[in-house]
Amino acid sequence: AQSVTQLGSHVSVSEGALVLLRCNYSSSVPPYLFWYVQYPNQGLQLLLKYTSAATLVKGINDFEAEFKKSETSFHLTKPSAHMSDAAEYFCAVSPGFQKLVFGTGTRLLVSP
Amino acid sequence: NAGVMQNPRHLVRRRGQEARLRCSPMKGHSHVYWYRQLPEEGLKFMVYLQKENIIDESGMPKERFSAEFPKEGPSILRIQQVVRGDSAAYFCASSPPGQGPTTDTQYFGPGTRLTVL
């Protein structure tokens, strides 16, 4: 069965610092991988998705993620954090047939 | 172009009552998914529907929960005889008609937060 593990339920960075949110996946077939962001009391917004076209995926708001098959990882990065990036981030894998399996989420805290 | 609409945004029910959650997909989208988010947890898949068909209900509890997506109108997630453990945020997502078993982008609504007293 497909699953994702997000290391660190909370990550704190200073404004302007590098953001790194970790995601490792388990999949018996080539996976589709996603990062979503959730702001307080809102739905999920897609940041980026990997569908095997390119291993480095660029998303909205300068976020990007790199698919590394050898490490079964899909970590999310952003070169410089903004206060507005404070939110909950979810990694998800698709086992196919239109179903998403989510990780438990990482709350990003950005301090001035 | 309106996004995925869910109502109500907040719903309070007493134990034993019924809860009805509605989801209107984005225009042109014929696939609807329901997910549940328990406090401090990620989203868990419940059910995937197309118009008038349940495609995958592997995440639905066996009892008290049902979902439909009629030919006309919104998708409905119905919870009968609610219990305190049903308190959660319920999210609906939609996607356009797909092309085989690949996953199209799912667009999420703002969610319905159900509180059972």
Image (spheres, grey):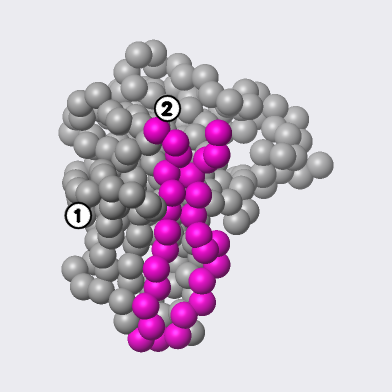
- Is B27 one of the magenta-colored residues? yes
Can residue A30 be seen in the rendering of this structure?
A: no
The amino acid type of the residue labelled 1 equals Ser
What residue appears at the point 46 percent right and 80 percent down from the top-left corner?
B13
Residue B81 drawn above or below residue A38:
below
In front here: A90 or B75?
A: B75
* Segment colored magenta: B1-28
Q: Where is the N terminus of chain A found, in terms of image quarters?
A: top left
Mark 1 and mark 2 residues within 8 Å of each other at the beta carbon? no
Side (left or right) of B111 relative to A24? right
Residue A84 image position (x, y, % from top left): 72, 39
Numbered circle sitting on residue B58 = 1
Residue A49, numbered circle: 2
The answer to which image quadrant residue A28 occupies is top left
Q: Which quadrant of the structure image shows residue B18?
A: bottom left
Picture coordinates of residue B32, whole percent (x, y) = 34, 45
Front position in the image: A1 or A42: A42
Protein chain holding label 2:
A
Crowding near the residue tagged with mark 2, few <14, some 14–19, many ≥20 C-alpha atoms within 10 Å: many
Residue A13: percent from the left, percent from the top? 68, 40
